[in-house]
Amino acid sequence: MIKSIGRLNLDDYKLIDSQVEKIFVCLSKDRIEEATGLITEMANTQNYFVREELGKRLAAYEGPGAMKEVCAKLLDDHIYGIRATALFYYYYSNIDNPEVLLHILGKTAETVRWESEHIIESLWKSHPELMKQEVPKWVLSPSAKKRAMSMHGLEKVALDSPQFVLMHLERLLDEEDAEVQEKFVKTLIQVARHRPQHAYMNVYRWLRHGTEDRARLLWDALKVLVSIVARREREDQSNDFWNVTRRAVDDWRKDSSPLVSQMGNRLQQLLQP
């Protein structure tokens, strides 16, 4: 029996291959219900690696039968592991068709969260321009989980395209959902660590034209960033992140905008020994 968690060993792979062979035989003989039962039997597991390896092997099927139709139904199954396995089938079946994958991910962001995140990260690496074009549309989704997912993987392009990431975040500045806010804060921290100049320029603008609620959201990110600087006070002060952060705090304290100056004063307190 395959372990319920953890990476797979050679015996585990042999068991998966044996089950997949049975599934392929059933499909080739049009025994759809039997094939479906065999898939769900193995896919109903907590082991992420089993789900991925099973989905990958199902995608290799080239014989007669309705593999695509079977997995389409399983994508809506009430059991998470079965839905995840079906998603991996579609991932490996459409690995050269990112537009198709994005369409599917738009539907699974809520129902197959962890595997969707994994695939989104891979698409940011392999097709960044397509992702820049399509993922911002998710900000308009009525689903908070999908709006949060729109920020997943943005750190992959933060170094080369910081302004794109920051403009994406700007559209979520006044978000009320807690999960989206949490993802916003984490993403802003990541961008600021790589491109502090870009980040603080945008945060300054957001503060000047914002509200108290917006200031509270930005505080959650800024206090982390400034705390990093404070902890490294006696280390290498030639670091760009260190210098830009200190300069931003000093400038904000003198600003004519109450929200900006208040933020600067609060952050300065974190810098004091």
Image (cartoon, grey):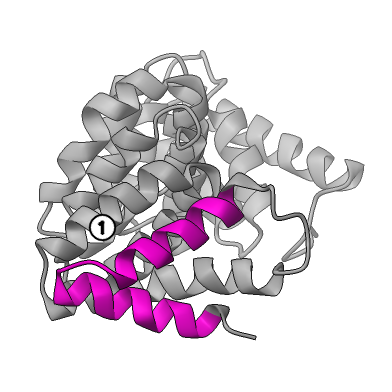
Q: Quadrant of the N terminus?
A: bottom right
Q: Which residue is mark 1?
A: 204
- In the image, which residues are magenta? 241-270
Which quarter of the rendering shows the C terminus?
A: bottom right
Q: Crowdedness of circle 1 by 10 Å Cα count: few (<14), some, many (20+)?
A: some
In the displayed structure, does residue 262 sit left or right of residue 36? left
Residue at point 63%, 73% (across, down): 230
Decide whether residue 247 is among the magenta residues: yes
Q: Is residue 14 visible?
A: yes
Residue 145, given in percent of the width and then of the height, sits at 27, 61
Magenta: main secondary structure equals helix
Amino acid at circle 1:
Tyr
Q: Residue at x 46, y 32 (%)?
A: 157
Outermost residue toward the front in this view: 254
Question: Does residue 173 appear in this view?
Answer: no
Instruction: Work out whether 247 lies above or below 268.
Output: above
Residue 111 versus residue 268: which sits nearer the camera? Answer: 268
Q: Position of residue 263 (x, y in %)?
A: 31, 76
- Report the front residue among 253 and 18: 253
Picture residue at 32% right of the left edge, 72% below the top: 253
The image quadrant of residue 209 is bottom left
Foreground residue among 231 and 167: 231
The residue that appears at 26% across and 36% down in the rendered structure is 135
User: In the displayed image of the protein, which residue is found farthest to the right?
Assistant: 10
